[in-house]
Amino acid sequence: MFNSGIVRKNGFMNSSKDTIQKRLADASVARQRESAGAEIARIPGMETQDIPQEQLDTMPTLYSEGYTYYGKTHRHLNSIFQYTVRSGMDLFTFDAADNMDLINQPLLMIAGSDADTKYMTDDAFSKATGTDNKELYIVDGATHIQTYWVLQYVDEITDKL
């Protein structure tokens, strides 16, 4: 799972909590400017950049593998990989793990054991208290992005489903 709202607010692995207020102020200013007719302000996506391998090697796996998967090997021609600056005002208030307690039917969540996003799956799973019929299935050795396309992992997930 990737909890996009929490990551947009706090940063991946809570790396940007100290800039929340500034980014909210920037979003507010962008919204004001756009409502007055200014061009839509966007946050550039890394997938459109040419990032050297040495730099990719220093990034969290989600971003280094995501750069390759979404930006190079599986990129949709119409995707611009950019958020609007003003979208922070909406995204910061979204938490995909909210209301997990309302799930009252069988629940299966799947995560790679090596996924640096697993903390988000663990959080959501722990909040799913409305059902006792739940399972967190771990794909041994898989990262988040690898569960999309590495045949060994895809076959394991398909068999589980």
Image (tube, grey):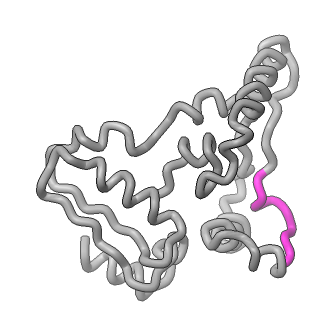
What's the residue at 59%, 29% (across, down)? 90
Residue farthest along the front direction in this orientation: 18
129 on left or right of 8: left
User: Residue 150: x, y in percent?
Assistant: 49, 83
- Any magenta on residue 128? no
Residue farthest along the bottom direction in this orientation: 152
- Figure quadrant of the C terminus: bottom left
Callout count: 0
What's the residue at 50%, 55% (across, down)? 2
User: Residue 156: x, y in percent?
Assistant: 33, 82
User: Residue 76: x, y in percent?
Assistant: 66, 59
What's the residue at 79%, 15% (across, down)? 32
What secondary structure prevails in the magenta region? loop
117 shown above or below 68 = above
Residue farthest along the left direction in this orientation: 132
Q: Nearer the viewer, residue 27 or 12?
A: 12
Query: Based on the displayed image, in which of its 4 quarters is residue 120 positioned?
Result: bottom left
144 on left or right of 75: left
129 shown above or below 143 = above
User: Residue 47: x, y in percent?
Assistant: 75, 61
- Figure quadrant of the N terminus: bottom left
- Any magenta on residue 48? yes
Tell me where the magenta segment starts and ends, as one range: 45-52
75 shown above or below 159 = above
33 shown above or below 3 = above
78 on left or right of 40: left
What's the residue at 80%, 38% (across, down)? 42
